[in-house]
Image (cartoon, rainbow, N blue to C red):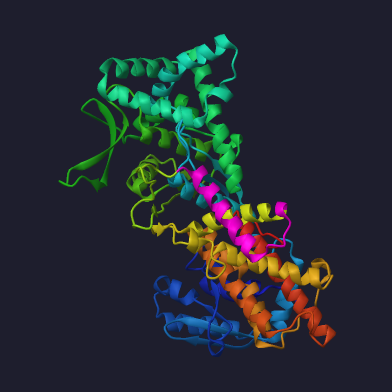
């Protein structure tokens, strides 16, 4: 039999649930049960569908269990249990069969069934002339994981870095920097060596203070803004120079983080500047635009101010200018009609929840989300703040945002001390490479392993620990498996089994390995990377139990030894793939 467990469940249950859900596979969530007396896997489909089916969860679970029980080649027992779960007891040869099939699949079962989608993911969204700080970390790495996961499942993923590169802040930087650029031109100096991102940020701060106290400076910056938006060639040339100088440092940080954003993914506010008037016109045609105090607004019934008055979504100001809402509405139109997106995901902090709720509703009211008889999904992925040990937003001692470059450098330095203590015999170059993998991985994993909606406390000692749910723990598990093959002088790819699951720890590890596709599918559906983190931690923990209880290289029976090497090989492969989906390196030694 070549079917996977997921295939079997889908074949048997799809006819029973198709009336309640468009894609039956979306409700077939399999989770290993911590108690073997309650089955190998628990299926919660009945709990999800009972309301739609208009019956008690346990009654629906009974019907599902009866259908699955007919698969005697897979299950020794199937039972419905309160309040509405279906417990599955697998035959041992079915698990072994599933592991062989899993190992033969280069995609490890991650490829989605059915029609793949075009998914646009808007994340990172840095501002020009400002250094990346710790506040940019979450959007950048959460968005990167979602892009990796959806691409791994076969979707066409389009990354979009919505740069803050237009408007008054940009005009202020231009006003301050243009004289410096002209001076550099006269001297024949390279702007790239004279104007670092840190220097640009310093200049921006200076002009911001000047605008607050000197009306003539504010007026001059506004004149620059008008000229820029009217397409002044000299200003546009300087704007491009400043943008490239800023992004050069940003891409260095992206490389350090292992984030896959490239210049081709840039679609900042400036990208939509010629689409704003058409966006406003399209809203007028839809009949939803209302003039209020000289501004053009959309009023939505369910958005109210504190006093109960309607809360407007302003898309064109009384002076004819545009704001964030206009840019985001233009982006939605472009992404739906030009990029042909089926799903658009925005990864920003939770403080922007109201903004995106309003923008999404305006787009829906205007009819833009309907295309070819389908509804394009607009999803906001909010996240909490990074806190210091005092449970306040993480800051430097002087009260400034912590620069991301400084944070990563310290993480690598601290990781080097951990590697030096753990394995001082490693060559110095290898220690430096491993320290970079461990340090960067620790920072990313500490963030990704949290429920993204929550704030979390940043702690180097906790995130660099070799025990507990940390990146170093997972990386060490991967490195330990690699050492097994080095000691045995066996290339991992040659260890093809077949698997034999005679020991309970072998069976438990085999079952956990088969959960990878379910964990990844859950991240794709719910957009919560911590689900994958938890799975990988459980897998590494299960491997530790297996390794402690089941000798591998010293097993007396050659068939058992080959089976255990097969399990080691597959665990290493799954750990490496899972860490890669998180954008974290898997060192072969630590």
Q: Residue 179's spot in the image, x, y percent?
A: 46, 13
Q: In which quarter of the view is residue 263 placed?
A: top right
Q: Residue 479's spot in the image, x, y percent?
A: 69, 65
Q: Is residue 371 visible?
A: no
Name the residue furthest left. Answer: 307
Q: Is residue 362 visible?
A: yes
Placement of 170 over or under 448, stated as above or below: above
Q: Residue 14's spot in the image, x, y percent?
A: 57, 71
Work out whether residue 372 or residue 402 is closer to the camera in this orientation and state it.
402
Quadrant in which the N terminus is drawn = bottom right
Q: Which residues are magenta?
A: 403-429
Placement of 266 over or under 353, stated as above or below: above
Q: In which quarter of the view is residue 324 placed?
A: top left
Q: Is residue 415 magenta?
A: yes
Quadrant in which the C terminus is drawn = bottom right
Which residue sits at x=65%, y=78%?
Answer: 509
């Amino acid at each position: 039999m070549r079917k996977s467990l997921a295939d079997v469940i889908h074949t048997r249950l799809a006819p029973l649930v198709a009336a309640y859900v468009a894609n039956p596979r979306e409700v077939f969530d399999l989770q290993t049960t911590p108690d073997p007396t309650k089955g190998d896997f628990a299926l919660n489909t009945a709990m999800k569908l009972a309301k739609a089916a208009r019956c008690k969860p346990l009654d629906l679970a009974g019907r599902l269990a009866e259908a699955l029980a007919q698969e005697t080649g897979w299950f020794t027992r199937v039972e419905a249990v309160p309040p509405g779960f279906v417990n599955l007891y697998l035959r041992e040869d079915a698990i072994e069969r599933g592991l062989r099939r899993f190992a033969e699949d280069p995609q490890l079962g991650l490829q989605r069934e059915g029609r793949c989608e075009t998914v646009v993911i808007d994340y990172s969204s840095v501002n020009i002339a400002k250094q990346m700080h710790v506040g940019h970390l979450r959007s950048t790495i959460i968005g990167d994981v979602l892009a990796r996961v959806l691409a791994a499942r076969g979707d066409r993923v389009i990354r979009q870095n919505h740069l803050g590169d237009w408007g008054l802040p940009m005009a202020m930087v231009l006003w301050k920097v243009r004289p410096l650029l002209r001076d550099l031109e006269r001297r024949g100096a390279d702007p790239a060596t004279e104007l670092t991102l840190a220097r640009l940020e310093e200049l921006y701060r200076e002009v911001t203070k000047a605008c607050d106290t000197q009306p003539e400076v504010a007026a001059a910056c506004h004149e620059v803004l008008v000229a820029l938006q009217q397409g002044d060639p000299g200003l546009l040339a300087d704007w491009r120079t400043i943008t490239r100088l800023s992004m050069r440092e940003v891409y260095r940080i992206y490389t350090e983080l292992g984030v896959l954003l490239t210049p081709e993914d840039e679609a900042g506010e400036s990208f939509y500047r010629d689409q704003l008037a058409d966006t406003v016109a399209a809203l007028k045609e839809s009949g939803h635009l209302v003039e209020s105090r000289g501004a053009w607004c959309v009023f939505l019934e369910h958005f109210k101010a504190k006093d109960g008055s309607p809360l407007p979504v302003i898309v064109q100001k009384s002076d004819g200018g545009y704001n964030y809402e206009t840019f985001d509405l233009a982006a939605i139109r472009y992404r739906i009609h030009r990029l042909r997106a089926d799903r658009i995901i925005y990864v920003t902090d939770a403080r922007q929840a109201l903004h995106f709720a309003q923008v999404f509703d305006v787009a829906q009211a205007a009819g833009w989300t309907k295309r070819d008889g389908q509804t394009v999904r607009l999803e906001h992925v909010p996240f909490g703040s990074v806190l210091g040990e005092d449970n306040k937003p993480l800051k430097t001692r002087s009260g400034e945002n912590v620069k991301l470059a400084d944070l990563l450098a310290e993480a690598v330095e601290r990781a080097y001390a951990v590697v030096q203590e753990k394995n001082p015999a490693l060559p110095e170059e290898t220690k430096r490479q491993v320290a970079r993998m461990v340090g960067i991985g620790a920072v990313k994993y500490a963030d990704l392993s949290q429920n993204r909606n929550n704030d979390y406390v940043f702690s180097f000692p906790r995130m660099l620990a070799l025990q507990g749910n940390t990146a170093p723990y997972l990386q060490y598990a991967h490195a330990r498996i690699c050492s097994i093959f080095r000691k045995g002088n066996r290339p991992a790819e040659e260890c093809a089994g077949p698997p034999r699951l005679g020991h309970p720890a072998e069976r438990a590890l085999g079952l956990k390995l088969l959960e990878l596709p379910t964990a990844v599918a859950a991240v794709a559906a719910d957009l919560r990377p911590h689900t994958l983190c938890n799975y990988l931690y459980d897998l590494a923990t299960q491997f530790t139990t297996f390794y402690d209880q089941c000798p591998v290289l010293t097993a007396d029976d050659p068939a058992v030894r080959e089976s255990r090497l097969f399990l080691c090989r597959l665990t290493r492969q799954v750990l490496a793939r899972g860490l890669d989906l998180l954008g974290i390196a898997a060192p072969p030694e630590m």
